[in-house]
Image (spheres, rainbow, N blue to C red):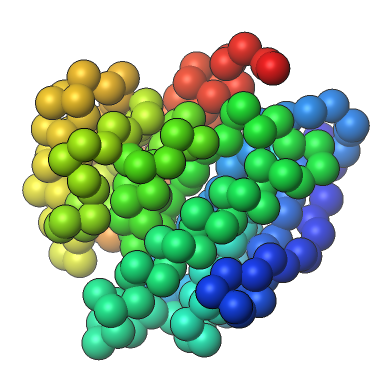
Amino acid sequence: MPVTAQRNSFKSGGKAVAVETFQATGTSSRPAILMLHGADGLSANTRYREGARNVAAAGYQVHLVHYLDRTGERRASFGTLFQNFVSWRETVQDALAFASDHSGADPRRVGIIGISLGAALGLAVAGSDSRVKALVSYFGPLPEGAIATTSRLPPTLVLHGSADPIVPVSNAYAVEALLRQQNVPHEIKVYPGQGHGFRGAAEVDATARSLAFLERHLAGLQRP
């Protein structure tokens, strides 16, 4: 199914934040997905756009959010990671409003796919924002203190590599424990030998799991 791409922007914290919107042709209302990239940013990584196109081809409106625009960075540096996290989280919340109001989006069916740092932001936002109905976390850390004890995560899929040297797999099990504690529908898949990013059969399997999970917990929700 042909997928179109359109570049837009919204304001967050007084800054213009770019967003690339991918969707298949057609006029029917469809679920909206925020795709949140990792700390490496979007300038030199085409895999995020390829992933966005794949999800859009499955019937979603996908918004690839340039949240680093909020702090004027091309990639997140370790030195500023923690001090900027709150600003990026606010930008993701503003992106939810942008996606919910976007033409052709179903505001009752909004989800997040987060990768690494993007997954941490997704966890932080999804726990406190009821607009998020489903979350897919690709090898993301559990941000300490970012998820309030009173928050409740939506149905969540956790994907991680057992040999991840950047975000240890213990983070995936910590998220799983939190989901169990909250009695939230969830799935976890740990890929043996995979590092920070999946390759080969693991990458194919992760994509298939993500789409199946979104179909069950987001696309299948009753339309307004």
- Relative placement, left or right, of 133 versus 11 is left
**x, y percent for residue 97:** 62, 49
Q: What residue sits 54% from the left and 24% below the top?
A: 218
Query: To which quarter of the image does residue 54 belong?
Result: top right
Could you say which is closer to the camera, residue 67 or residue 98?
Answer: 98
Q: Is residue 55 visible?
A: no
* Placement of 8 over or under 30, stated as above or below: below
Could you say which is closer to the camera, residue 116 or residue 65?
Answer: 65
- Relative placement, left or right, of 6 versus 50 is right
**x, y percent for residue 175:** 19, 40
**x, y percent for residue 149:** 16, 40
Q: What residue sits 37% from the left and 26% below the top?
A: 155
Q: Total of numbered circles in the picture? A: 0
**Residue found at the far top of this picture:** 222
**x, y percent for residue 200:** 41, 47
Q: What residue sits 60% from the left and 22% below the top?
A: 219
* Placement of 43 over or under 57, stated as above or below: below
- Relative placement, left or right, of 81 versus 67 is left
Q: Is residue 49 visible?
A: yes
Q: Quadrant of the N terminus?
A: top right
Could you say which is closer to the camera, residue 213 or residue 70?
Answer: 70
